[in-house]
Amino acid sequence: MKVALIMGSASDFPVVEQGLKILQEFGVESEVRIISAHRTPDQAVAYGKKAAEEGIEVIIAAAGKAAHLGGILAAVSIVPVIGLPLKSSALDGLDSLLSIVQMPKGIPVATVAIDGAENAALLAIQILALKYDQLKVRLQEYRAKMARQVEESDSRLKQRLQQ
């Protein structure tokens, strides 16, 4: 099981790294690359075309501004692509979000929240969990842990308010 995290610029890494940490926590192999849809389009197309044969099962494409990276990769690959819009301009990432969600019919790119690297990684893991049972179990444990944390926070709040 392997997920590619592709970003358009080195400056995107602090956000992408949050998703990388989730993938590592779940034991998912990942490949992290910088490939620009606009500055290295031939490289983007070549990467997308070879992704499946290189063992990539999900691609997370992090991009800001015009955010065409996910679309280019999806256009040349049957590997599922998750678009990660980045807050990288005067428009606070809204431009990136709208660019990613407005894909033409026939070339889907799943999209998460602006700077939502953790959810992009979790969505990739959910996709992989359809094939890998150990990830399904780990996801169930992860969600149960989140639920316990919320319940513990609620309990602490109730105790505090009763004092």
Image (cartoon, rainbow, N blue to C red):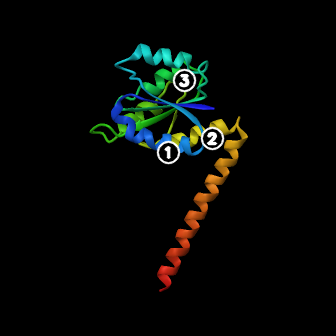
Residue with the mark numbered 1: 118
Location of residue 28 in the rendering, given as x and y in whole percent from the top left corner: 59, 37
Tell me the amino acid under the disc marked 3: Ile
Disc 3 versus disc 2: distance between alpha carbons? 20 Å
Residue with the mark numbered 3: 107
Location of residue 38 in the rendering, given as x and y in whole percent from the top left corner: 36, 20
- Residue at the location (47% across, 16% down)? 45
Q: Looking at the image, can residue 33 be seen? A: yes
Disc 1 versus disc 3: distance between alpha carbons? 24 Å
Residue with the mark numbered 2: 126
Q: Are marks 3 and 2 in contact (CB under 8 Å)?
A: no
Tell me the amino acid under the disc marked 2: Gln
Quarter of the figure with residue 133: top right
In screen coordinates, is 124 left or right of 11? right
Q: Badge 3: few (under 14), some or many (20 or more) residues near its Cα, within 10 Å?
A: some
Location of residue 162 in the rendering, given as x and y in whole percent from the top left corner: 50, 84
Specify which label sits upstream in the sequence, 3 or 2: 3
Location of residue 145 in the rendering, given as x and y in whole percent from the top left corner: 61, 58
Quarter of the figure with residue 23: top right
Q: Is residue 41 above or below residue 56?
A: above
Disc 1 versus disc 2: distance between alpha carbons? 12 Å
Q: Are marks 1 and 2 in contact (CB under 8 Å)?
A: no
Q: Is residue 55 above or below residue 121?
A: above
Specify which label sits upstream in the sequence, 1 or 3: 3
In screen coordinates, is 137 left or right of 48? right
- Residue at the location (66% across, 53% down)? 141
* Rendered image: mark on residue 150: none
Secondary structure under the numbered disc 2 in the rendered image? helix
Secondary structure under the numbered disc 3 in the rendered image? loop
